[in-house]
Structures are given as structure tokens and as C-alpha cells.
Amino acid sequence: MFDNLSERLERSFKILKGEGKITEINVAETLKDVRRALLDADVNYKVAKNFTDTVKEKALGQNVLTAVKPSQLMVKIVHDELTQLMGGETVELKLEGRPAIILMSGLQGSGKTTFTGKLARLLKTKKNRKPLLVACDIYRPAAIEQLKVLGEQIGVPVYSELESKDAVQIALNAIKEAKANSCDTVIVDTAGRLAIDEQMMAEIEAIKKAIQPDETLFVVDSMTGQDAVNTAREFNERLDFDGVVLTKLDGDTRGGAALSIRTVVNKPIKFVGTGEKLEAIDQFHPSRMADRILGMGDIVSLVERAQEQYDEEEAKRLQKKIQKNQFDFNDFLSQIHQIKKMGNLKDLAAMIPGVSKAIKDVDIDDNAFKSIEAIIYSMTPEERTRPEILNGSRRQRIAKGSGTNIQEVNRLLKQFEQTRKMMKMVTGSKMGKMMMPKLKR
């Protein structure tokens, strides 16, 4: 995500490295390169020009603070302006209705139906809400079936009327259904088209007028660049939506949509889709996105994802086992599963400051844990709890059963033993002892 833009901006800032102070000449040279980087990322021309003009105005005349180099000061100014460009502050969903109603809009292929399922899962698991999904795409039976499959996967009911061709009435009937079944949130998935047309816009306008949603969200494929921005402008003129959802940010996106759309339509980006999995959805934080664009990582989001998988009782149990040196392969497997639930491995690694650039050309396969899991699953229950009994013949059997070789099994056992020793050292340290009272409370 934004790899090319990040690399170009980093090169731009190098112009100021070694300079004793910020001058009109070196600022102009740097910002000329920054503007090129933004335009190459498919940022709207006027947005790019206004951005660099603002940065120039703020940079000139700035006194370089002690121990702060001109290049560092420029990064700070660019970071602050990028944050403002993308909205400045995080904007929450409005969920005040009884039930709260969310209307989804967007072109076909933007990932709208998939995102509808992701949003329902997020509201159910993180906000403790009881959503109802509504299939209002009366033109594509496949879209209705897709929504039903997503509903089954996340345990959320789906309302549909296969014989009806009246999207407005389906939406109204769904709201009655939600009230009857104590669902506090209704998410209406509407029809998408390959291009904007009058029939599509008239229909979704009629749905919005009839159901009076708390939120109208416009879902857009971020990989389409300025086309996404232009489509958002046209939708907004007709629908006056409340917020934007950018999907496919994990793909080869240049970043133009994320950086332009807020300024062009004057509506906040509320969510981003970062992968195909149903948990691959993040609330949009302008400052954190600016961090990532400038190669600073996003440690806050990484910690939040980890906390989502954190189980306090499990942590206490694991702490006791580690202290007694009883951490086994069952625990190891459990930790792997928690990491996998956090999302795409390369995306997670890129959230660590300084790592994004290092792994730019490294292929991190999401199936990296498969061979490890296969080896552990090939162990007997006793072998998992007592790794010390794994002699040569047992290792040969495990290698054969897991479709690996003896070297891979030996490598995993060595890594496991190193992990166990490290965990023991951490829990035995002063920091570990300081944490113990908290875990006991």
C-alpha cells in the first residue's frame, strides 16, 4: 500500500539532507519533487498543487530547532498536511436510529457487497450490535446469494425477497423485520452498475428518501485512482452521502484516491478494506495513514489488532505455564492462530516502523505457517505436551506424516526451544515480575 509514493517522498526529502537551514531554493527543489510524486500517485492536480503550496508557505521562515534537521522539519510539515488532506480527524459512524440504518452505495466491482459483510461483522464483534443485512440488488441474483453466504459466515441474518423487483419496498419491509426481531442495525446493500446511469441513481435516491438512513456510505475501489474520485463526486451530487469507504488498499494502489477524495467531495473517509478476509477492515485514521505513507509504520493499529485477539484468561494461563517452563506445542499452535487472525502478514509487518521499506520486495506468504502447523498436527497429544521425548524415530514419523523433511522438523524444534527459553527469561525479568500483580488481579 502506497509503496511507490512512500519511496518517492523519501527521495524528495533527501534533497534537504545535509542542509543547515531551510531556504526558498532547497524548499522549491524538494517540493517540485514532492508534487511529481503526488501526481505519479494519481493525486488530483489541483489537490497536489494546493498541498505543495501550503507546505512551502509553512516551511519557509521556519527556524530549525536544536537537533532538528531541515529534512526532519519538512517531514513533520508534510506529515501534518497529509493528515489534514485526508480529513484531519477520525470520523465515527452515526448509529442513533432505532434501528440505526446504513445505506451502501457504489459501482459494481468496487467490493461493496463484501464490505457490507465486513461492516456487519465489525459492528457485531466490536460494537456488540445486532445487525440485519438487506439484499436490495434486485438485478443480480448472485449478489443476493453472495450476501447470504457472507451472512452465514459471520452469523448475521439476511433479509431478501427473491420474487420482488421493488427495492424500496424490500428495504422498508426489512426495517419492519429488524424491529420485530430486535435487530438494532440495518445495513442495506444496493445494486451496483458498471457505470453510473439514471435508473441506478433514481432507484438509490428513492431508497434513501424512503428509509431515511443514519449513514449513507459510498464504497469505491481505491485502485481506480482519479476515476474513483470522479465517480464519488457524481454520486455525492445525487446522494449527498455521509462518508467514503476505500476498498482494495492492499492491492497495487497508487494512493491518489485516498489523498484526493476528501478534498474533492468534502466528505470523510470512514473505513478502508485491506484484504479479502472478513476481518480485513479498518477504521480510517488520517494521522496513521500519513505515518504509513511516510514510512513511519502504524504501531497503534498493530497494537489494536493484537488487542482484538487478546484473551485475558488465556494470557494468565499462558503466563503460569511459561513460568513453570511448561509452554508446549499446543500453546505454540494457539499463538500462531491468533497471529493469523490479525490479518495479512506483510501488511502487519509494514505497520512496524522501519520495516515497510525493508520488506518492499520480499514475498511474505500468508501460508508461511502451513508447514509448521502440519508438523505440530502430526505429533501425538503426548509429543505436543512433552517435546523432550521427540527422539530420532519420532521426528522421522512426524516429517513423513506432515509432508516435510527431517531438517524442517529439527529446525522447528530448535526454534521452539529458543522461543521457550526467551519467554522464560522475559517472565523472570524485573519487567515480567512487575506485570505479574496485574495479571493476578
Image (tube, rainbow, N blue to C red):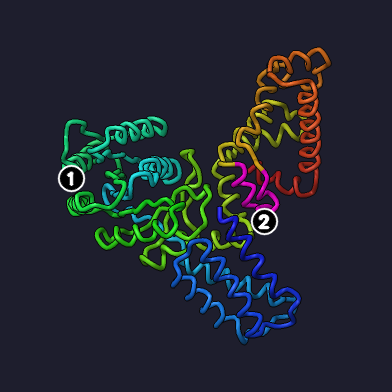
Q: Secondary structure at mark 1?
A: helix
Badge 1 local density, few (<14 within 10 Å), some, or many (20+)?
some
Point 59% across, 57% down: residue: 4
Residue 186 in view, yes or no: no
Give residue 353's mark.
Answer: 2
Verify CB contact (< 8 Å) between mark 2 and mark 1.
Answer: no
Badge 2 local density, few (<14 within 10 Å), some, or many (20+)?
some
Where residue 222 sits: x, y (%)? Answer: 45, 53
Based on the displayed image, in which of its 4 quarters is residue 369 positioned?
Answer: top right
Point 60% across, 33% down: residue: 337
Where residue 138 sits: x, y (%)? Answer: 22, 38
Q: Secondary structure at mark 2?
A: loop
Based on the displayed image, in which of its 4 quarters is residue 432 positioned?
Answer: top right
Which kind of residue does numbered mark 1 sit on? Val
Where residue 199 sits: x, y (%)? Answer: 19, 49
Q: Which residue bears the numbered disc 1?
A: 168
Q: Is residue 201 left or right of residue 256?
A: left
**The C terminus lies in quadrant:** top right
Give residue 403's mark.
Answer: none
Which kind of residue does numbered mark 2 sit on? Pro
Q: Is residue 273 left or right of residue 216?
A: right
Point 64% across, 69% down: residue: 12
Residue 401 part of the magenta segment: no
Q: Residue farthest to the bottom?
A: 61
Residue 356 part of the magenta segment: yes
| Magenta stretch in the rendered image | 345-362
Q: Is residue 215 left or right of residue 359?
A: left
